[in-house]
Image (cartoon, helix red, strand yellow):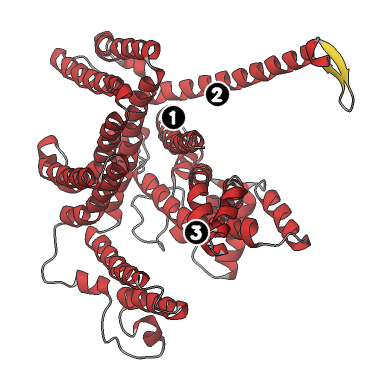
Amino acid sequence: MATDTATGDIEGFGTVSRTVGTVFRYVMLAATLFGLVVLGVLLVYVANDAIQPLTADPGWHLTFLLTLVVPTLGVGAYLYRRDADALGYGALTVGTFVVTLMFGGGAAMIFVDILPPLLWLAYVVAFAVPFGVVLAIQRRARRIPFLTRAAATTAAFYLSLFGLPGPIGSALGIPRVVPGVPGLVQSAPFVPLDWMSVTATLGLGVAGAVGWYVVGIRDRRAGLLSGGAAFAGIVVAALAGPAVGLDPLPAVVLASVSVVPTVAYAVGTAVDRPTVRVGLLVPLVVIGGALVGEILVGAFGFAGPQSWVDWQFLTSAHSRTAENAGLYPAIGGSILLMVTVAGLSFPLGVGAAVYLEEYAPDNVFTRIIDVNISNLAGVPSVVYGLLGLGVFVTYLGQPTGTVIIGGATLALLILPIVIISSREAIRSVPNEMRQASYGMGATKWQTVRRVVLPRAFPGILTGTILALGRAIGETAPLIMIGAPSVLFSLPTEFTSKVSAMPLQVFAWSSLFASEDFYTKAVPAGVVVLVSVLLAMNSVAIVLRNRYQSEQ
């Protein structure tokens, strides 16, 4: 046979050569390694300018080498030889804590400087009330006609959010009779403290998620106890936060977004998979080594690196001097832009994907749509900036450079990517599962909602996160819609002017170009932006790997 020799002939394929295939494989490997090495050298060069590790005292390096680096490498080598799964579990625990800590910092920024906690509480209650009504209606769904249920659901959300008669009455000149739930909550004579509002909403939601996670691996009683313990831990974090230099509000947010989910994952996995418990040595060595090293460095007076990525840089606004320049308003602007982009692109992209895969007929019109979506995914970003300028600013007459216009423009940019990735995820669901659902008497919509979408959701979420990672690094669309390169305050609403991290770095390298900005502020801004991108991509990679392991 041809496959048993170095070369041979196969009908329809021509000459088959193992040598050519081997050479091609190693050429591709060399190209991949070359690209990775070049990118790594570039990142190291930029990180060296931003962090300046060589400016630290030799004692500082030696201390952390002995307390952190050597123990971590030793534990890693031991676990790698004993159980690679335990090493992966420990590394994932550390990575989860680091990534969620970054996201927790962004969430704390929103509640401290952008979104008033009382307003957040008011709208959470406003959505919770009609949601409870909908659940009550669903329990009697078989007795109530569909149109009646739809009308009742719409009326419940309308009355809760806007009151009576609401925007429709205002358009007709009818005065408001009953305010909406948000107005009632905000006008109450006694309002909770900020940290209490966030604890009662975000903290309670996280505690419920922890309880649901534990129910999946143990039982309902363990889930209730775990949820209660998680909520108690969040409250304790608020009370103990001032003792470690944190106000109660950011302490609650960090505990809810980072500490509690990480602990729940670590403990839940250790209970569910006893064989990987030894992997907890990794976070213990990393966290313990870092703390011990910090204590020893302070005790001996060793100076650390003179890094430009410090607390001052992350919490300050732009300055005309590189030493005082900060990225805080740009970070907040990027967060608001991503919230807007996700809110616009996710439902539209997933809805379009579901229609094209599950409902659209295979005809010329559908094929034209497919070709155009594929082509739009490769259009340069500056073209979408021109589209946003022409449609939203010129045609609709909206002000330039606002959060909503910037978010809508970036949403158009990543919408084809979201549609394509969502279609691939939906297409990967085995057709046998659909046929089994139909065989049980389910309708098309019930099959899509209860079989297809839950199975495809991890892939859909992975593609969306990767698309958001592209959007957060885009500069050209924001320049085209007139977003300011420099802002000195955070945007507080969707109609406020907004900047972003790429725009701020662009301004430092062009409008304020000087040796100081090139060697200080620009590298620091690039390191922060790349860190955010890596954090988002790491979430997508973890979701993808978990999804593939469940197949």
Q: Tell me the crowding category of disc 3: few under 14, some 14 to 19, or many 20 or more residues within 10 angstroms, Cα based.
A: few
- Per the rendering, the mark at residue 449 is 3
Left or right, 406 with respect to 371, comes to left
Q: Residue at x 21, y 43 (%)?
A: 222
For disc 2, the neighbor class at 10 Å (few under 14, some 14 to 19, many from 20) is few
Task: Confirm whether residue 323 shows in the render.
Answer: no
Q: Nearer the viewer, residue 15 or 33?
A: 15
Quadrant for the N terminus, please: top right
Q: CA distance from mark 3 to mark 2?
A: 42 Å
Q: CA distance from mark 2 to mark 1?
A: 15 Å
Where is residue 420? Give x, y as percent.
62, 49
Residue for point 14% across, 47% down: 235
Residue type (three-letter) at the residue carrying disc 3: Arg
Q: Residues within 10 Å of mark 1 (few under 14, many from 20)?
A: many
Secondary element at tag 1: helix
Which label was assigned to residue 39? 2
Q: Position of residue 205 (x, y in %)?
A: 27, 52
Q: CA distance from mark 3 to mark 1?
A: 46 Å
Please give the name of the residue rendered at 32% of the width and 10% of the height, measured from the top-left corner: 74
Marker disc for residue 523? 1
Q: Nearer the viewer, mark 2 or mark 1?
A: 2
Secondary element at image label 3: helix
